[in-house]
Image (cartoon, grey):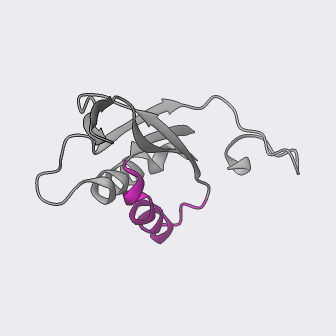
């Protein structure tokens, strides 16, 4: 079992969820977060004063899947979250880590059947 964490631009969320639904991925957690990487924010003008916005709005997706689905899910997220053309700085990141155990609270199921 694997845990995929993807940080994407908020306006790409619908594209990613639709693409994942098309291949049968149903368990997704989405959280609104703020952060920056190489993009390092931007400057804005407010009432004549310029200020820097360091943390940009992003969406964090968490998806627990079977190990044999990782490559397909990562590729779908990568394609659906990428900006048009060559992509742009700030398109996001995808992290994959091992998931030792999963428990379904309602039924008590354990392991991959609990996904």
Residue 20 painted magenta: yes
The segment highlighted magenta reads: 9-26
In this view of the protein, which residue sits in the foreground, 52 or 54?
Answer: 52
The residue sitting at 71% across, 38% down in the picture is 102
Residue 101 painted magenta: no
Q: From the top left corner, tell me how far across and down residue 49 is, in percent.
A: 28, 34
Q: From the top left corner, tell me how far across and down residue 67 is, in percent.
A: 50, 42
Give the answer, above or below, for where 108 lies relative to 37: below
Q: Quadrant of the N terminus?
A: top right
Give the answer, above or below, for where 65 lies relative to 2: below
In this view of the protein, which residue sits in the foreground, 78 or 68?
Answer: 78
> Where on the picture, by quarter, is residue 35?
top left
The residue sitting at 54% across, 60% down in the picture is 25
Q: Is residue 65 visible?
A: no
Is residue 46 found left or right of 109 in the rendered image? left
Is residue 45 found left or right of 96 in the rendered image? left
Q: From the top left corner, tell me how far across and down residue 74 is, in percent.
A: 37, 48
The residue sitting at 26% across, 53% down in the picture is 82
Q: Is residue 94 visible?
A: yes
In this view of the protein, which residue sits in the foreground, 46 or 7?
Answer: 46
> Where on the picture, by quarter, is residue 18?
bottom left
Magenta: main secondary structure equals helix
Give the answer, above or below, for where 73 lies relative to 21: above
Is residue 90 found left or right of 20 in the rendered image? left
The residue sitting at 30% across, 28% down in the picture is 37
Q: From the top left corner, tell me how far across and down residue 108 is, in percent.
A: 87, 44
Is residue 51 found left or right of 58 in the rendered image? left
In this view of the protein, which residue sits in the foreground, 51 or 11?
Answer: 51
Which residue is situated farthest in the front direction here? 48
């Amino acid at each position: 079992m694997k845990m995929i964490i993807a940080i994407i631009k908020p306006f790409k969320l619908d594209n990613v969820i639709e693409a994942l639904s098309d291949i049968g991925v149903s368990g997704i957690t989405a959280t609104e977060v703020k952060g920056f990487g190489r993009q390092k924010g931007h400057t804005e003008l407010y009432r004549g004063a310029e200020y820097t916005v360091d943390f940009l709005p992003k969406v964090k997706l968490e998806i627990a899947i079977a190990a044999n689905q990782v490559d397909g899910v990562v590729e779908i997220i990568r394609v659906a979250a990428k900006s048009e053309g060559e992509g742009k700085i700030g398109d996001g990141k995808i992290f994959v880590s091992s998931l030792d155990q999963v428990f379904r609270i309602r039924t008590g199921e354990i392991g991959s059947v609990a996904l």
